[in-house]
Amino acid sequence: AVEKSVEKQKVTDYGGGNLDVIGLHQDGGEVEVTLLFIRQGRLIGRRSFPVEWKLDLPELLSGFLQEYYSSKVILPDQLLLPFALESADLLGEWLSEKRGRKVRLLAPQRGEKKRLCQMAQRNACESYRQRGQRQQAREKLLEELQGRFHLPCFPERIECYDISNVQGDQSVGSMVVLLGGEPTPAEYRRFKIKTVIGADDYASLREVLQRRLQRGVEEKNLPDMILIDGGKGQLGVLTTVLEEFDLGSRIGAVGIAKSRVMANVRGKVVERSEERFFLPGRKNPVSFRHGSASLFLLERLRDEAHRFAITYHRKLRSKASLRSSLEDISGVGPARRKALLKKFGSLKRIRSASLEELQQMPGMSTSLAETIFQVLQEK
């Protein structure tokens, strides 16, 4: 298995230095690229990447290396490749310039380094096999959701929403996304509520959904299923907004409600049911067996939406608190606050500024700098 092949094992007789070893496995139109990382004679880890095969393998590998090593990664002494590249000299010069030291690209034909390349190839093959198994499991799980929730289409893209506020202050919404059954943080979105005054979760949810779907219609980027953290009330808001956009038959709507509890005869509180899922037009909720993969996926998605909303809410409250603190200081007017933000770039950096840094601000007196520093340290 891949896990066993990447143990921190001793690698000997390869000539020393730090190595990245590249392995490829090709199947149909897909290619799995695996990197083994050898540092100070030990195989310390691996990374694998699925790549769509649209080019010849040498072009694909050359493009992959340029993309991967453009990011902030530690460059090795040598890259061991599964085959020679015409662009190896140019790549080597580019990598050497990035590293500030020589980086060699080799395609070994024999010996220990050849064995390392074969190990990387086996890892790529095994990684591809395991990735395929995980993909099949996710597809099966999503097919189950489509059937249990009577969704109009396969739920390739699932979005989950949550609203967060504390005593009606700084209400925010969050959207988290599953693509193909996997969390996709790059697609997450936060919403600062603009039109609702006070704590009104239903109205806040309506605003968030309207903003999201309006943009989705314009950009032709809509979910296949929306999961709402809440019961029938929140689900009613969702179905109403979907109808406003004529999407009721296009997007599946599901509400997730907390599990119900009851007290037994000895007064102990015990769980009566798992999470309940409400569907439009259906009186009784859908439930999943305890410990099922589908239930775990949906609970994790709901919890991620809640975490994402809470994190944003705390960030806004912290900014509001700091802004209020600055406004309360005599001698810090709008122009001074603007100058502070221009100097330090953010409210967070103003808070972390040293007294000396504040004193260096143009037109800042020593006493005012000390007052600002003291007030912000107390917050």
Image (cartoon, rainbow, N blue to C red):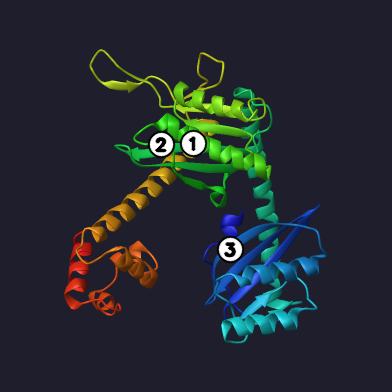
Name the amino acid type tagged 3. Arg
Asked whether the beta carbons under mark 1 and mark 2 sit within 8 Å of each other, the answer is yes
Residue 212, by quadrant, is top right
The residue beneath circle 3 is: 46
Residue 244: where, in percent of width, then height? 60, 28
Q: How many marks?
A: 3
In the rendered image of this protein, does residue 141 appear above or below residue 274?
Answer: below
Residue 20: where, in percent of width, then height? 62, 72
Left or right? Give the position of 258 relative to 26: left
Residue 46, by quadrant, is bottom right
Q: Residues within 10 Å of mark 3 (few under 14, many from 20)?
A: many
Location of the C terminus (image quadrant): bottom left
Name the amino acid type tagged 1. Glu
> Which one is earlier in the sequence, the residue at label 3 or at label 2?
3
The single residue placed furthest to the bottom in the displayed view is 101
Which residue is located at x 42 percent, y 21 percent? Answer: 273
Q: Residues within 10 Å of mark 1 (few under 14, many from 20)?
A: some
Left or right? Give the position of 329 relative to 176: left
> Which one is earlier in the sequence, the residue at label 1 or at label 3?
3
**Quick check: can you spot residue 46?**
yes
Q: Secondary structure at mark 1?
A: helix
> Which one is earlier in the sequence, the residue at label 1 or at label 2?
2
Residue 241: where, in percent of width, then height? 56, 29
Residue 107: where, in percent of width, then height? 74, 77
The residue beneath circle 1 is: 207
Residue 63, by quadrant, is bottom right
The residue beneath circle 2 is: 196
Kindly identify which numbered label has been placed on residue 93. none
Q: Nearer the viewer, residue 23 or 299?
A: 299
Which residue is located at x 67 percent, y 29 percent? Answer: 250
Q: Secondary structure at mark 2?
A: loop
